[in-house]
Structures are given as C-alpha cells and as structure tokens.
Image (cartoon, rainbow, N blue to C red):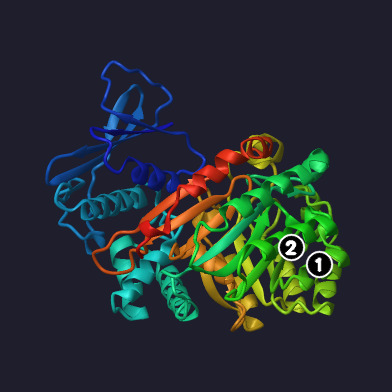
Amino acid sequence: MITITFDKRDFEYDVYELVREFYPDGEIQTRIGEDPGRKEADVTLKILVFYEKKKITVRFLHTAGGGERPIRENTDGYAQAFPAREDTEGSVQADRRADRRGAKDALKNLLYGLLCRETGRTMPWGNLVGIRPTKIAMKLLSGGLSRQEASAQMQQRYSVSVPKADLAAYIADRERRILGSFDYANGYSLYIGIPFCPSICLYCSFSSSPIAQWKNQVDNYLDALCREMAETRNTFAGKQLQTIYIGGGTPTTLEAAQMDRLLWAVEKNFDLSHLREFTVEAGRPDSITREKLEVMKKHGVSRISINPQTMNQKTLDLIGRYHSVEQIHESFDLARSLGFDNINMDLIVGLPGEGPEEVAYTMQEIIRMAPDDITVHSLALKRASRLTQMKDLYAQISFQNSEQIMESTAKYCRSIGNEPYYLYRQKNMAGNFENTGYAREGKAGLYNILIMEEVQSILALGAGASTKIVYDTGLEPGRPVRIERVENVRDIRSYIDRIDEMISRKKAITWEQHSI
C-alpha cells in the first residue's frame, strides 16, 4: 500500500491522481496529518507533502524491516520543466497564497520528477491528470501562440511528451477552425439520453440497463422524457439550437415506432432551423434495422454511429457484445445505401486478449468500410464495470496498449483521409493514453468538440443527463472558466417517478444570468 500524507488538503486530488498514474494497480490512501503511533506493516511507500507559505516539500520514504529508508529527493535534471525555483531536497519555492495555479504546477512538476526517478518511467501526458488536455492547448492558441509554441509550452510546463503535445496543439488548432463560425453566446446544444442497451458490455460503467429487463417501462420512460422536453424547451429561449446528440445507452434499442415518437417530439418542441448537426448514436449493430434507419432519415438525422469496438469475433464474444462481425458490415452497408453520408465508428484498444496483431486486423477491416469518423478509445477500467469487479476471472488474459498501437491506429485512420479533430482522457486508461476522434474534412462531430472544450451550453434530458450552463469559456486571458451543472438522477425508475423535480431544476435556470 502507498500512503500520501499532507499537512494541509491543498491539491490533494491532483497529487493522488498523479501518483495513481504511476501505480494504477496499487492501493493508495491519502491522509491529513501523521499519526506516530500507527503501525502498518503493509505500507511499502510513504509520500509526505508539506506546505509552508512559500515552499512545498515532498519526501518519499520506503518502509522495510519495521523502519523507514528515505529516498534522496534530488530533482536535478528536471529543473527545466519547473515554473518555480527548486532545491535538491525535494522542495519548490512557490507562494500558494499569491498564486495558487503556480503553486500547483510547481508541486506537480516536482512530484512528477520524483515519481519518474522512483519508477524509472515517464508518462505520455506528463503530469496532466485532467480529461481535457486540449483545453490547455486551446487557451494557449487563443492567447496568440502558434501551434509550435503551444506544444513547447505544454512540454515545458507539464512535461508532456513531444508527440502528445504536438497532437494536442494540432487538434486544438483544428477545433478552432471547425468551430470558428459558432456563436457560443447565442447558441446551445441538446443532449437526449436513452439509457437502454441490448446487453451490458464487460467494460461498461455508463448509466445504461439491459433492454430486456425494462421492455415494459420504455414507453413510461418516453412519457417522462417527452414531458421534460416540453416543459424545459424554453430554458434557453431566444438562443439558437445548433447541435443535437441522442446517446445513451443505445438509442436504437427503441422500436422504430418509439424512435419516431421521440424524434417527432424533438421537432415539435424545438426550432431546428439553425441546426448544424443531428446525431443519433445507433451504436450496437444488433439493434439497427432498416425501419429505424428510415425513421431517422425521415426526421433529418445527419450523423449516426455504428460502433464495433473490435472486428475480432472472439473478443466480441468475450466482452459481451452479442453480435457478429458480419452484422457490423451489414449495418454499415445498409446505412450507406439509405443515404447516410456521415457515419462514425468507435473502436477500443486495450481490450482483453488483444495485442498489435488483433488491433491491426480491426483497423484493416474498418478502413475497408471507410467511415467518415473513427474514434479510437483506450480501454478505461472503471470501478463500476464488471471487468473490474470480476477481475480475478480475467487474471490470465492480457490487456495491452502501447505507443506503437496508438501510432498504428493513427496511421490507419489517416490513410483514408481521417485527421484527428478531438481528444479526451479518462481515469484508469490502459497505458495512460487517450481517446482520439479522426474525421475527414467536413465530417467532424461538432457536438463532440463542443462538449469536450466546454465552450457551449448544453440542455440535457433523460436519466443521468447533465445540463451544462457555460457562463465563461475561460479562453480569454485572465478570465476563469465558469460553468454550472444541473444533474438528472441516473436511476431510470427514479427519473420516471421524480420527473417533476427534474423539470423544476431546469426551470430555475435563466439566460439572463448567462454572459459568455
């Protein structure tokens, strides 16, 4: 076990998450203040973080034979990465009262250097622990830096590797060009959640439930959802609805008539005259039918997802996706034949039992279909997933991800003209990598960029949906991000029973407060 002891709670989350990046399988506990009388035979490493007004000190102590052996906290070789002066005893000079951001950056750089020395490893994203690294690059570009300068800043300030810093700067630059015509202050997006799936995948931790168990409640769910839609449609009155995303779960678990009902409700309640993208996450090939696709086409859906995750049948069976590789091809061909010209496909690398050869086979099969948008996800092992909860059953199966695999997927995507356009990270990702979307020109998922960069407000409906009101994007120098969230309950039954409460929460939002 690893313990992290602080004398104050400052930056506790950042320190914990950074240590966990280096010890993803270890048990890590944080504490405030030391207890000299505490005896813990299972503690193998202690990390001590002490704060003074203008100095932060970090010490590493190994426990062995009932005693403690200190590690010399020598930070030589990392000085060029620090924004504050450091000495050779694991301390940085930083006035956390005067400059909290500078103090946090100094602490993370110091801790990262010590962790690199302790483990002999570096991380592709350096000391960054947040899920949106491109937001940093976006802010640097908005401040007038070039792509090359933004990349250099990320390398210097956060120890990000050259390839990842270049990738973040490239994507941020492309995002700025794609969103250049968006009016953040006068526009908003709509998210609608359908929390049902044909089955729950082994790695899934999303708010979704097997459709077989909820078959008799789907219409009741739609009743509540359509009511929420009608009652909250004026939340952002006077603003232009620019993108719609219907996700889940798997929205195409709805029957064709239920999908028709949902999309009619959208048309009835919202002005779609300014709409620039309308996405339905079709998702599982075993839930897609001609009738459902025809309903979506009739209602102007412009973008859909057909998500194989892998093209290896053995892996599909293992992870609980009860469809065949042939169904993936059939669903894709059917959608193309009906005129869908913007199709996204999601893939996951790091799946159990898959290495470079299996990933290469998947990519070869995918590029044969030439989807307009490919999202490559690195497997994230979430606590709520069955894969994590029953990990002992899969102890003999390998989980592989590497820079080689990530570079390979990028080359395959680019071989059919799909360039990276958005990126985000998750906790517990295989190999400490990222999720990246690759799209051909004119086919990038606009909602994906908007939600990742948090530059536009989103009205979110349905169980587990989170409405987001962006008061300030934080892109202008000296102005912090200001975002308010209004959450819906995740549980389906609670959502249906408490729909009046969900509606009341949104009615409390007023655009007069909104001032991007």
Q: Residue 214's spot in the image, x, y percent?
A: 79, 40
**Residue 425 appears left or right of 272:** left
Look at the picture and state if 414 lies above or below 260: below
Q: Residue 118's spot in the image, x, y percent?
A: 35, 46
Residue 480 image-quadrant placement: bottom left
* Residue occupied by mark 1: 295
Circle 2 sits in a helix, a strand or a loop, which is it?
A: helix
Give the residue type that dot 1 points to: Val
- What label does residue 264 carry, if any? 2
**Residue 261 appears left or right of 424:** right
Q: Residue furthest left?
A: 54
Which is nearer the eye, 215 or 229? 229
In the rendered image, the quadrant that contains the N terminus is: top left
Q: Residue 127's spot in the image, x, y percent?
A: 36, 55
Which is nearer the eye, 380 or 344? 344
- What label does residue 484 carry, if any? none
